[in-house]
Image (cartoon, helix red, strand yellow):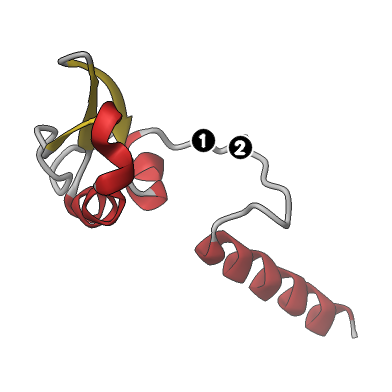
């Protein structure tokens, strides 16, 4: 795995106790890179985009329900289905 283009791992930190006030900020920060969530002053969770998660931890065997898959995966899925249908005609 190449770590050349990955964002720095030390992102902004949010306290879980105040998370409901910081949801929009958390989402924006996660788009810039991994974001650390603290509980009682200790980092307990990391929040990041699905795309970054796939870069860091590729899962070739990962399965998605059609109702929960990320939009980009849904687009790839339907492109493959349409291509397959066009080839079978």
Q: Which residue is label 2 attached to?
A: 62
Task: For residue 48, say whether it is visible.
Answer: no
- Please state if 20 lies on the left or on the right of 26 as rendered: right
Rendered location of residue 35, percent (x, y): 21, 38
Which residue sits at x=59%, y=67%?
76
Residue 59: which disc? 1
Query: Around disc 1, counting alpha carbons within 10 Å, would you say few (fewer than 14), some (14 to 19), or many (20 or more)?
Result: few
Picture quadrant where residue 16 is located: top left
Which residue sits at x=67%, y=46%?
64
Q: Are marks 2 and 1 in contact (CB under 8 Å)?
A: yes
Rendered location of residue 30, percent (x, y): 25, 48
C-alpha span from label 2 to label 1: 5 Å
- Please state if 53 lies on the left or on the right of 13 as rendered: right
Q: From this view, report whether residue 58 is shown above or below residue 80.
A: above
Query: Around disc 2, counting alpha carbons within 10 Å, would you say few (fewer than 14), some (14 to 19), or many (20 or more)?
Result: few
Rendered location of residue 75, percent (x, y): 59, 71
Q: From this view, report whether residue 81 is shown above or below residue 13.
A: below
Rendered location of residue 45, percent (x, y): 31, 24
Front residue of this view, candidates 22 and 89: 22
Which residue sits at x=61%, y=37%?
62
Residue farthest right in this picture: 89
């Amino acid at each position: 795995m190449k770590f050349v283009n990955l964002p720095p791992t030390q992102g902004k930190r949010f306290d879980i106790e105040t998370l409901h006030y910081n949801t929009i900020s958390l989402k924006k920060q996660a788009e810039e890179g991994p974001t650390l969530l603290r509980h009682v002053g200790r980092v307990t969770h990391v929040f990041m985009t699905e795309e970054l998660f796939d870069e860091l931890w590729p899962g070739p065997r990962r399965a998605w329900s059609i109702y929960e898959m990320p939009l980009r995966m849904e687009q790839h899925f339907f492109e493959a289905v349409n291509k397959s249908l066009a080839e079978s005609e």
